[in-house]
């Protein structure tokens, strides 16, 4: 009887450990962990050797090597020749990746103050340079050369200690890796697989954010095989979140969360609730992910615009992964710090309208522009990105709310309720009394029947 019981336990355990097969039907059946859909706001960090030249005419500075060596863009080629020299190799930038001012505790505190709930660091971009020591990137990682520091390990420790979730971006392909160019199958078996597994086993991330998938289908990358290992056998199988960049056919079709990039509005957001899938918009504060010294003030979104983007994204059911690009010596540019802290100040007052909320779509049209909705349980949040100068009319309210308030202000708001429609009378605009800037939230307590 005892032996039978043991065998039953072992059988159940084995079944649980192998419940996801290495095929998309099985992998796609795994739900996205709830912590992610509750989190809403994360910080992306693009940091690597591209942070040394930190320049491009426009667009993505982290593509410096490719744009200079392959595309041979005239402006970038001229810049490289003038500032680095005709015979200066991209690999030689490693001496400038010093990270001497990198203070991970300060980074983690900034991210926490910004109101972010998770962080995603580029463990390895398309250049192949890894921010942790591993056999597959021997002498081409931040411990063996350059700063001689375990960037992944240092940041992981302090981010988790700050109570945030830690994740890693990982590029499947490497532009100039000889093995990748000669034999992609061997590259996958001998380089990609052991390197990704080492990253997961060593740092136990809550997010594995793949990229660089577009050269081959997921079958070539053996993506479902890796994901089955990740979900069934790895130490993070229960909580880890993955994205949709696992093969040239997989975006918005397979994997975990769907990802948009500088899209601002998810293309499938108007689909029916039955077809809804968790998604995430990712973009930089400026036009580049990696730090670009060529960007000017007008290339950066204002704090107001970033807060509005967060509101719009969450109201449409998504998360916002907002990128920063540190300098080669380890500083987060002041303008990026300022933008993050402004978002954090707004979230300290209005966070309950963002975190752990669900989409709410009114049946009737709503008066006014710049009005968005989120819901939590029986409470409805009306988020105005323009301060309303006239009454707000909202339909499809289930019942008379027990109270209407503005977040950050304890005083009650005048309103009327009739036939499932509510009219809110916003207080007369008085800048000295407003609880915040950028966007204002009216909370309608207990007005919804359906619990979200």
Image (tube, helix red, strand yellow):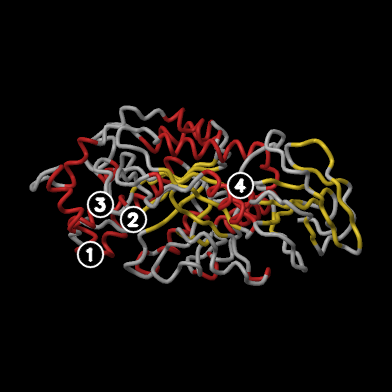
Marks 3, 4: nearer the viewer: 3
Marks 2, 1: nearer the viewer: 2
Query: 126 or 401: nearer the eye?
Result: 401
Query: Residue 195: x percent and y percent?
Result: 34, 49
Residue at image position (48%, 31%) is 158
For marks 2 and 3 on the same chain, the one whose residue lies earlier in the sequence: 2
Query: Residue 149: x percent and y percent?
Result: 32, 32
Residue 136 visible? The answer is no
For marks 1 and 3 on the same chain, the one whose residue lies earlier in the sequence: 3
**What secondary structure is marked by label 1?**
loop
Task: Work out whether 367 lies above or below 2.
Answer: below
Which residue lies under the disc numbered 1?
183
The CA distance from mark 2 to mark 3 is 10 Å
Which residue lies under the disc numbered 4?
39
Which residue lies under the disc numbered 3?
64
Residue at image position (19%, 64%) is 182
Left or right: 43 with respect to 382? left
Residue 233 visible? The answer is yes
Query: Residue 448: x percent and y percent?
Result: 83, 56
Marks 2, 4: nearer the viewer: 2
Query: Residue 193: x percent and y percent?
Result: 35, 55
Dividing the picture into quadrants, the one containing residue 250 is: bottom left
Which residue lies under the disc numbered 2?
59
Residue at image position (86%, 45%) is 403
The CA distance from mark 2 to mark 1 is 31 Å
In what quadrant of the picture does the C terminus appear? bottom right
For marks 1 and 4 on the same chain, the one whose residue lies earlier in the sequence: 4
Query: 94 or 338: nearer the eye?
Result: 338
For marks 2 and 4 on the same chain, the one whose residue lies earlier in the sequence: 4
């Amino acid at each position: 009887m005892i032996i039978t019981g043991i065998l039953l336990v072992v059988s159940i355990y084995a079944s649980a450990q192998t419940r996801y097969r290495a095929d998309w039907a099985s992998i796609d059946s795994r739900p996205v962990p709830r912590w992610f859909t509750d989190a809403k706001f994360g910080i992306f960090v693009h940091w690597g050797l591209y942070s040394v030249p930190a320049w491009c005419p426009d667009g993505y500075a982290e593509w410096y090597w490719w744009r200079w060596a392959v595309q041979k863009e005239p402006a970038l080629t001229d810049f490289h020749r003038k500032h680095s020299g005709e015979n200066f190799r991209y690999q030689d930038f490693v001496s400038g990746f010093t990270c001497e001012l990198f203070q991970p505790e300060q980074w983690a505190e900034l991210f926490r103050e910004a109101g972010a709930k998770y962080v995603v660091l580029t463990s390895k971009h398309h250049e192949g340079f890894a921010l942790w020591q591993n056999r597959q990137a021997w002498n081409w990682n931040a411990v063996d050369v350059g700063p001689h520091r375990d960037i992944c390990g240092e940041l992981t420790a302090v981010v988790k200690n700050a109570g945030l979730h830690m994740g890693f971006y990982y590029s499947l392909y490497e532009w100039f890796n000889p093995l990748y160019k000669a034999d992609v199958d061997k590259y996958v078996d001998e380089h990609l697989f052991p390197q990704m597994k080492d990253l997961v086993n060593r740092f136990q991330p809550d997010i594995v954010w793949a990229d660089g998938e577009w050269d081959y289908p997921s079958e070539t990358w053996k993506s479902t095989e890796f994901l089955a290992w990740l979900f069934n056998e790895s130490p993070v199988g229960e909580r880890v979140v993955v994205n949709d960049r696992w093969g040239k056919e997989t975006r918005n079709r397979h994997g975990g969360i769907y990802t948009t990039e500088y899209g601002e509005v998810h293309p499938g957001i108007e689909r029916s609730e039955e077809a809804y899938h968790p998604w995430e918009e990712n973009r930089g504060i400026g036009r580049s992910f990696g730090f670009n010294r060529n960007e000017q003030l007008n290339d950066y979104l204002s704090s107001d615009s970033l807060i509005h983007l967060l509101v719009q994204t969450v109201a449409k059911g998504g998360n916002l992964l907002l990128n920063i690009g540190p300098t080669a010596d380890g500083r987060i540019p002041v303008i990026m710090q300022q933008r993050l802290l402004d978002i954090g100040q707004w979230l300290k007052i209005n966070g309950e309208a963002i975190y752990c909320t669900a989409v709410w779509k009114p049946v009737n049209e709503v008066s006014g522009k710049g009005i968005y909705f989120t819901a939590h349980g029986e409470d409805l949040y009306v988020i105005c990105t323009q301060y309303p100068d006239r009454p707000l009319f909202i339909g499809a309210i289930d019942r008379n709310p027990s109270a209407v308030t503005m977040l950050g202000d304890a005083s009650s708001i005048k309103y009327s309720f009739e036939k499932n429609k509510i009219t809110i009378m916003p207080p007369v605009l008085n800048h000295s009394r407003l609880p915040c800037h950028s966007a204002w939230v009216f909370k309608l307590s207990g007005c919804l029947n359906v619990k979200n």
